Amino acid sequence: MSADTAIAQVKELFAAQYGADPTGVWAAPGRVNLIGEHVDYAGGVCLPFALNQCTYVAASPREDERIRICSVLPGDSEPVATECAAGSLGPGDIEGWVGYALGPIWALREAGTLPSDPRGYDLAIVSEVPLGSGLSSSAAIECAVGSAVVELELGSESLADPSVRSELIAAAIRAENDVVGASTGGLDQSIAMSGQSGHALKIDFLHGETMQVPFDLDGHGLAILIIDSKAPHSLADGQYASRRGVIDAVAASAEAPTLRAIGDADAIEAAARAWAEKEGYDLDVALRRVRHVSSEIDRTLHAIELLRNDDFEGFGADMYASHASLRDDYEVTVPQLDLIVDTAREFGAIGARMTGGGFGGSAIALVRREDVEPLSQRIAQAFEDAHFDPPAFLAATPSEGARRVA
Ligand code: ADP
Ligand code: MG
């Protein structure tokens, strides 16, 4: 689906549901993370880029204090639709997908970015980002709705203000953590707001710094292929929280705000050892968990330096090493993701790894442009041979963050 098609579709949906044209349409992208996985909540470093696949929100303000919202999910023809009181959008008030969509409005009011009195909106949503595929449809819907409401309330130039963008990132994170109850770190929301075309974004969560890193795939004859494993994926289940729980607990026991703030790899290991002994937690598991995080942070810093020197081969080797760490030390991969990466390596891809939270979701492969088709075929064949459901393939183009599109 092209952006123009999606924009036309979301306007039509709005008109069909509410019998009027929307005031405007806003978009926020999905993302892939090139490297630096499961380190955002540990004060680490990651390197995502925004996809050109977006979630689109057509929106208008209402005179009363109701919110009407509908969404056509990818692959569905009929929208899901619901209605709620504009004043009841906080934790416990709304559930399920509506929490992702409307939680940011609550968080923006709590933060004082938006007026605290309840205001009503009509909202219609169409997404090109597949849901639950590890490409962050969640941050896309949070940031698209948040952007729409901010510009409806604060004026059409407000997204140009970097401080408003920062407040939107914080509100989207708070919505996902507090309204939905998913303890995600902040990578997804940061890139959904801050993506720039032709660039990946280095995010350093310890120092609160971001830096655009040129990522000119075309110019080097390269491509990133996204492979959606189609293995079931849910971050809201206990697995993600249990990994994060260990990392947060080790940091807290060392009286540090995040794991990385404890110090170097040896200091982190010592803290994990002390924590596991005190808590009676499996020592081997605790050490492997923190080893993933500290090695992944070092690897990501290393990989970013390679990228800045156009060393794509070296960067690809770090991608493979990242996957191995996520598989062996952090144990968040599934057989489908491992099969994709093994097949890519045998094929001769420059690099490949799972991307996103894991437990299903997607992998990425860095390849020469002419290898996209043959590698896709090889992976599809490997899935057939293993009797897995067929994977889906998407092209990844480093693109813009959240914006008004109509
Ligand atoms: P991911 O972010 O990797 O796609 P998550 O499990 O974090 O996976 O978020 C997926 C959930 O977000 C969906 O199950 C749904 O509740 C919500 N969601 C995302 N996009 C939409 C959308 N366009 N319409 C309705 N709900 C959505
Ligand atoms: Mg998500």
Image: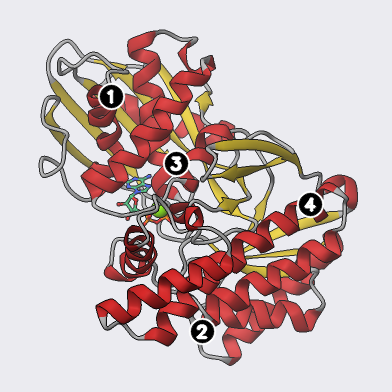
Query: At label 4, which amino acid type do we have?
Result: Glu
Q: Earlier in the sequence, mark 4 or mark 2?
A: 4
Q: Position of residue 329 (x, y in %)?
A: 52, 79
Say whether residue 47 is visible. yes
- Discs 2, 3 touching: Cβ within 8 Å: no
The label nearer to you, 1 versus 2, is 1
Find residue 335 and name its label.
Answer: 2
Queried on whether the Cβ of the residue with tag 4 lies below 8 angstroms from ligand 1, the answer reads no
> Disc 4 and disc 2: Cα gap in Å?
31 Å
Which residue sits at x=45%, y=59%?
Answer: 259
Residue identified by numbered label 4:
305
Query: Does 202 appear above or below 328?
Result: above
> Disc 2 and disc 3: Cα gap in Å?
27 Å
Q: Secondary structure at mark 3?
A: helix
Query: At label 1, which amino acid type do we have?
Result: Ala
Residue identified by numbered label 1:
111
Residue identified by numbered label 3:
140
The label nearer to you, 4 versus 2, is 4
Queried on whether the Cβ of the residue with tag 3 lies below 8 angstroms from ligand 1, the answer reads yes
The label nearer to you, 4 versus 3, is 4
In-front residue for pair 372/182: 182
* Category of crowding for the residue at label 1, using alpha-carbon neighbours closer than 10 angstroms: few (below 14), some (14–19), many (at least 20): some
Q: Position of residue 87 (x, y in %)?
A: 11, 25
